[in-house]
Amino acid sequence: MFKQFLLVAAIASLALATSSGAHCEYALGRSASTVARSVSLHSDATRPTEDLLDDIVAWLSSNFDLPAIKERPTIEFASRMELARLRARDLASSQGFIGSEGQLAQREVVALYDDNTRTILLPDDWGGTSPADQSVLVHEMVHHLQNLGRLKFDCLQAREKTAYLAQAKWLERFGLSLEKEFDVDMFTVLISSACMY
């Protein structure tokens, strides 16, 4: 029975690999901080405010098992093409460190978090006023708190589960869903965050 479940899960994962929706990504690998990246200047008017970051940290720590660390990440902006390039470079340098990478690699990268530099990379068109934009920041702040709290996971992709759950819960506060806003369903989240060795 368990083997049948794994077979169905593997087939579903492969079928989902062809989807093209957007998603947030977890931490860039070790090489990210050593390679120059092209980031754009962004108006202070659309940068996340300190109050928003503090509110997100408080909300995450009260709703999820995350530490309420007040140290803010560096926030930079990059084109979607640059985000995709960074993610592709990271995947190439860490061959096979994500079991369901075929599926994840097919999706548009919405944002990234770099563990080494403690930097969130948001797309240069991020406005920050919509619940969907804020949910992207929530997702990446989960990774920031996971990093600063030195939380341990069975595998790297397992970090994504909490980030997607937090993003989904944030969106639900505004009557929105992860599936409608980003074309990501919870089954995909569970499969892509599973540690399959």
Image: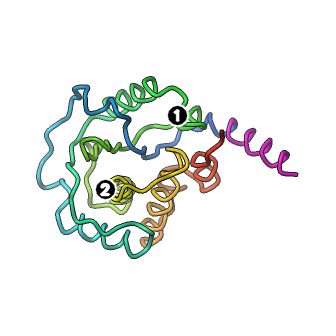
Q: Quadrant of residue 119?
A: top left
- Kind of element beneath mark 1: loop
What is the number of callouts on the image?
2
* 87 sits left or right of 2 in the view: left
What amino acid type is highlighted by mark number 1?
Answer: Phe
In the image, which residues are magenta?
A: 1-14
The residue identified by callout 2 is 148
Sequence order check, earlier mark of 1 and 2: 1
Which residue is drawn at the image coordinates 68% and 40% (left, top)?
13
- Compared to residue 130, the image places residue 172 above or below, namely below
Q: Quadrant of residue 59?
A: bottom left
Q: Is residue 41 visible?
A: yes
What amino acid type is highlighted by mark number 2?
Answer: Leu
- 156, 25: nearer the viewer: 156
- 14, 32: nearer the viewer: 32
Q: CA distance from mark 1 to mark 2?
A: 21 Å
Residues at badges 1 and 2 in contact (C-beta under 8 Å)? no
Residue 127 location, x and y as percent?
25, 53
